[in-house]
Amino acid sequence: MTEPVLVEVERSGLVESVHRGSLVITAPDGSVIHDVGDVTSPVFPRSSTKPLQGVGMLRAGLDYDGADLALACGSHSGEPGHVERVAAMLAAAGLDESALACPPAYPLHEPTMHAATEPLRVTMNCSGKHAGMLATCVAAGWPTDGYEQPGHPLQKALADTVVELTGEPIATTGVDGCGAPLFAYSLTGLARAFGRLVRASSGSEELRVADAMRAHPWLVAGTDREDTALMGAVPGLLSKIGAEGVLAFALADGTAVALKMSDGAKRGCAPLAVAVLAYLGVDVSGLAELANPPVFGGGRPVGRLLVSWSAP
């Protein structure tokens, strides 16, 4: 099927580009309130799956809460505060950077990237997740070698958790950019899982993940990043962006949203998210910069991104 246009890119009064995609809104009970595009076929949610994996790590014995848990469920920018905490997480498990299976990468944060002399595993945006995976293996008594392989006990446990939280079987398992297994399931399953995290009972692994991420949005992403801005501006919001144009979020009452841009472009995700939040009755006055990002020409704004999704 051809997905509808959800976001337009306007330059000098002309629509220059469009971003098609799919979007689903689920109620606190998991029922679908609204959907456009294809929300039932499997997709790779990429890093939007990290909160679900975080739940699986806790269930397997990981003793994280607060900042460390937020970083284990995040995609950090590689800023000094991120890197120092990842190193501390590894040290607490008796490990160092050499144990990480994620590839070396430069920081996402531009000032930090320009100051870096070489790509490192610890500055790769998924190193927090990998540190959490390694610490889980140590806690569970599993080998750390090969922890990123699909057949490892850790990855089997995380896959089982994803199946439970989404309410769907995993359609296929791929390889994420960080080298860890990547599970395919639908946008509807992703939204339902996020709703389950925020409305879980006190003390549950699900709510521990949600609370940690909401309390530490900078550790989930970083300076000038979408998740940090969204959670910082909307009390009780849980948000996690993924590569290739995926974003999932849930309000404190369990209403949840999952969306994906068909062309994989991230730039349309935040404006669409702000529009959906406004439709859901959320005060988005603190998200003006994300709502209609400018398009530049000659160093000055000459257009903007416009949400073309029609609220039901």
Image: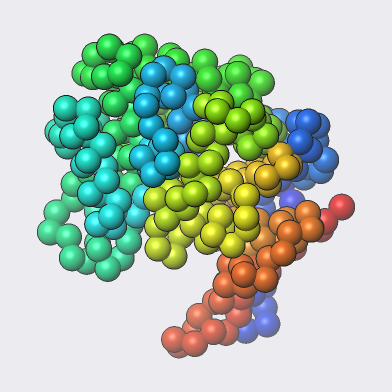
Residue 41 at x, y percent in the picture:
67, 30
Q: Is residue 231 left or right of residue 144?
A: right
Q: Residue furthest right?
A: 312
Q: How is the image coloured?
A: rainbow
The number of discs equals: 0
List x then y, in percent, for residue 28: 76, 36
In the picture, residue 57 is in which quadrant? top left
Who is closer to the viewer here, 71 or 21? 71
Identity of the residue drawn at 73% across and 59% down: 282
The residue depicted at 56 percent of the width and 55 percent of the height is 231
Whether residue 304 is visible to the viewer of this picture, yes or no, is: yes
Residue 7 lies, in percent from the top left, at 67, 61
Residue 177 visible in the picture = no
Q: Position of residue 74 (x, y in %)?
A: 42, 43
The image quadrant where one finds the N terminus is: top right
**Which quarter of the figure has residue 43?**
top right
Horizontally, residue 91 falls left or right of residue 300, namely left
Q: In the current view of this chain or complex, which residue is farthest to the front?
A: 202
Q: Which residue is drawn at the image coordinates 67% and 78% (left, top)?
A: 14
* Left or right relative to 284: residue 269: left
11 is higher (above) or lower (below) than 143: below
Compared to residue 191, the image places residue 136 above or below, namely above
In this view of the protein, which residue sits in the foreground, 147 or 281?
A: 281
Residue drawn where x is 45% and y is 30% of the image = 54
Tell me if 180 is positioned left or right of 49 in this view: left
